[in-house]
Amino acid sequence: MNPIHGDKLRGHLETLILATLERGEAHGLEILHRLETRGCGLLRLKEGSLYPALYRLETAGEVSAVWESEGHGRRGARRRIYRLTAKGGKRLKQARGEFEQFVTVLGGILGAAT
Amino acid sequence: MTRDESHWPPDFDAEVRRLVEPIVAGARRKRMIEEELLAHLTEAYEEEVVLQSDARAARRAVRRRFGSAAEIGRQLQAAVPRRERVLFSWLGHMETYMARWWIAGLVVFLVVFAIAVPDSVEFSIGALSMLVGMGFVRACQTSPVWRATWPMWAGVAAIAIGPAIILPGLAKYKQTGEWTQTAGPIAVGAFILLAGLAVIVWGLAFRRKPLA
């Protein structure tokens, strides 16, 4: 299978992040690792693009974030831990419904051609 | 890459600062983005340094993974809430205008002060000269045109100031016939005048070099 690059993910990244956070709170790099694992290594996302998406979700109130505690046992800068909010959960549910419809419609069209 | 690659932890600070600095947003948000990106890059580096042959390759891999700084910068800017973007863009402009108004107010005050209190003329001229000097240095720092032509402007200023010191000194000598009181100012004026000429000559020579 061919890798899926960032351009193809446009418009879906925020929903993918919400789906990732449904499994539990995580910091940026952990979210990326979860996406990589669940995408079977086929998602090719530029890591820097994750943060603007996270900030948009935070502004929209769909995720909340806290700084990790001081005694995080790591060197250097602190990470922010993101959590799905109730509003984010609702959006995720809605996006799943829309995506299922999208796949059904396009799958029907593309499947009919083969 | 000119930095020492062997030191630990990897110094991504400057790169992150360059990325975040132009973003129009509140200082708190910018600090937050800076720290979070720094934590990300450091952790990514820790992963890569295990996988790659050396620190240099690990850095390259981290940058590749992270993506184009220009593109990420644009995305980060777009992620700043509109009201915050508008507010800080406006505040940025206000800061510039306020600085200008502040300087204009100071100049007006010094001129009025010099007129109202005749004994303060020298003080006001000195303060105005300092303001002009500060403006000149600022212009040389920010404008490429001023940076390229500063020797000429500095030279012209020195040529104007030098005789302004020499001529009253010579007039005083003519009146009193005493060198002891006038030699000092005349020497200082002559030094400024010659320095101005030297700066202009040096500036012209300096400008010719890149053309040769």
Image (tube, coloured by chain):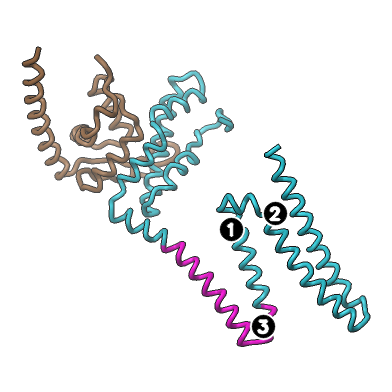
Chain colours: A brown, B cyan
* Residue appearing at x 63%, y 82% in the figure: B114
Classify mark 3: residues with Cα within 10 Å, few (<14), some (14-19) or many (20+): some
* Residue appearing at x 52%, y 32% in the figure: B8
User: How far from the left and from the top, in percent, is residue B122?
Assistant: 70, 79
In whole angstroms, how far apart are the C-alphas of marks 3 and 2? 31 Å
Label placed on residue B138 = 1
In the figure, residue A55 lies in which quadrant? top left
**In which quadrant will I find the N terminus of chain B?**
top right
* Residue appearing at x 75%, y 54% in the figure: B199
Drawn side of residue B9 relative to residue B130, left or right = left
Point out the stretch of residues depicted in magenta.
B94-123
Q: Secondary structure at mark 3?
A: helix
Classify mark 2: residues with Cα within 10 Å, few (<14), some (14-19) or many (20+): many
Is residue B107 found inside the magenta-colored segment of the image? yes
* Residue appearing at x 40%, y 33% in the figure: B68
Name the residue that disc number 3 marks. B120
> Mark 1 or mark 2, which has the lower sequence index?
1
